[in-house]
Image (spheres, rainbow, N blue to C red):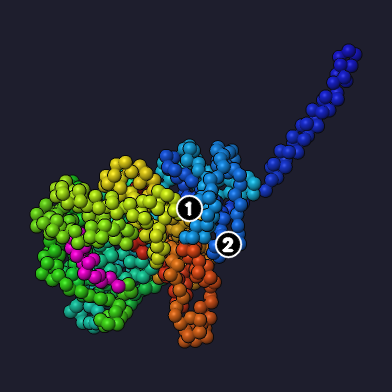
Amino acid sequence: MTNQSTNRSVSPLRGFGGFFIVLTALIALFACNKPEAQYSPFICIDQFGYLPESQKIAVLRSPEIGFDSTENYVPAKKYSLVDAKTGKTVFSAAPEQWKGGATDPSSGDKAWHFDFSSVTQKGTYYVFDPEKNVKSYEFKISENVYKNVLKQAFKVFYYQRAGFAKDAKYATEAWADGASHLGELQDANCRKWGHAADAGTERDVQGGWYDAGDFNKYTNWTADYINYLLLAYEENPAAWTDDFGIPESGNGIPDIIDEVLFGVQHLLRLQFDDGSVISVVKLDEAAPPSAAKGQSLWGNPSTSATLSAATSYAYAAKVLKQFSDNKEYVALAEKLTKAAEKAWNWAEKNPDVKFYNNSWEHGTQGLAAGQQEVDDQLRLEKKLHAAMRLFALTGDKKYQTFFDKNYKQTRMIAWSWVAVFGEANQDMLLNYAQLKNATPEVAAHIKQVYRSALDTAHNLPAVQNFVDPYFAYQKDYVWGSNGTNAKQGAIYYNIALYNIDSKLATDAKRYAEYYVHYLHGVNPLNMCYLTNMSKYGAEHSANTVFHAWFHYGNETWGGVGKSTYGPAPGILVGGPNPAYDWDKCCPKNCDSDFNNSQCFAHDISRLRNQPAQKSYLDMNMGWPLNLWSVSENSNGYQVHYLRLLSKFVK
């Protein structure tokens, strides 16, 4: 009885305990039923992720100017970094306002920064706003976070190969295709422009890459791609393994070298016995590329094309000599050396031979698209580049003498100018400066000018002072701004790479990395500018690209979600271009009512009169909206992105 009485005496407490248990259960139930956090377009992160040691900053944006200006966002007092697998908060902090609440004219946004750099643990995370129950896209922190991204972006060169089958083993069924441009009167027996019926002009011009969204091949630009692929390899060989998923993978040679050789073999086919080199090859277009049946045509040799080829021949020969145990590569290096010297000798005797393609004035309208011929200044810089590479290869003093005598005429030296529009001559000069047998005074002068030119308003001061709330400042957003973005990042990385200023080396790498993050989603559109990358970690990547294979309206490849497959993964699209405009025939003079109606096929208000960084539309329609000036790809954009990204692959 005593025990029972005692038990009864505590029953009110037991009742309260029961109430507490029920209350706790209800709270837990409410928490479980709390709506899942939705993605917010106002929390911008690198959608792939960050290296553990990297600075990691989410940009919180409130649109004030532009197409989204009515969608203001008030940031939370505190943000959390959440482990996406466990749901646990691993870090919290208050955001820091950019420039005291100023509106950035380049993006039209106000911004705040949430810095979670202290988190270094490998994992998958998202940034969380607890006040609005919204979050960023998920991303990873990992030592190898960019390796698979690099693989997909590099594989774009494989998809761009002309005259080479894309086997489903490497391209998957989605982008498999037969070898293109190997039919009658195509690349294997290509004839001269203006002499399409003359079999005596036939040349084998197989190989090389479709240059951009068009399928043409331009020697001046192909040589640039080869040079920058080789630079990317030499600057960080560890990033470039033999497992990138191309047909040559597993052959014991880094896949990037295999890709270079595909391009170099094409350039060798373009050289005549006298040393001169064809300037341009026009290819027919179709989707898929193997369906293109039209005749291929080549354009005359020129001094600029021949000097460009000499540069790539010499550079490739020098790198191939590193593979001294491969007899095939040793023999090819010797062949390339002779080709480079022949090209140099021809250019010496023919210093001003020009060829303008696609020009009414020169009677070549319709021969390819973009104009590949250069002016006198660029021709001189090409000759200096050829001299530098031949000197590095052969040690012949005649090339060094020419270089030392003329290097001061380059834009970088003459104008004390370092910018994204002079990257080839800048990198050429820096490469000479790091040669062991470079003239010491010349090497020192080059580095001194490069360093001083970086202190101009639109270089180091802009990024050091966070002029852009997205950290990736560009002075000018123009056609191909994503490519120039990658170049700007490389300009800063060069400070560390070429020992320009040892005190700035660590910061310079961080500045360069900002530009990688921008292209991966830290931008006003919260968009990864690589195509079709959701499978590889970027949930909001570009859906379309202006490209003859992946063209507008194509039911198989035209766009992600609008066609069976969309474009191939990893293609860097052109980027914001505030100079965009529809065709001059719009809105009422495009020859028919239907054509006129196409001026309004898409709302281009998101492109016109916008802040520079918002002047982009994920659309690939051609004439008369002419969206190639925002969404077309280029191997030039691609190779500069690859070079920059590879610096952060270990």
Name the amino acid type tagged 2.
Answer: Ser
Dominant SS in magenta: helix
At horizontal 21% and vertical 82% (from top left) the residue drawn is 198
Does dot 2 land on a helix, a strand or a loop? loop
Left/right placement of residue 62 relative to residue 52 reads right
Q: Earlier in the sequence, mark 2 or mark 1?
A: 2
At horizontal 86% and vertical 25% (from top left) the residue drawn is 12
Q: Which residue is mark 1?
A: 469
Left/right placement of residue 215 relative to residue 384 reads right
Name the amino acid type tagged 1.
Answer: Pro
Residue 396 numbered mark, or none: none
Quarter of the image where the N terminus is located: top right
Does dot 1 land on a helix, a strand or a loop? loop
Q: Position of residue 86 (x, y in %)?
A: 58, 39
Q: Position of residue 466 (x, y in %)?
A: 44, 50
Magenta extent: 371-387
Q: Position of residue 121 (x, y in %)?
A: 48, 37
At horizontal 47% and vertical 50% (from top left) the residue drawn is 46
Give the answer, above or below, for where 618 lies relative to 442.
below
| Image quadrant assignment for residue 70 | bottom right
The crowding category of the residue bearing disc 1, from other C-alpha atoms within 10 Å (few below 14, some 14 to 19, many at least 20), is many
Q: Which residue is mark 2?
A: 69
Give the camera-side residue of 494 and 109: 109
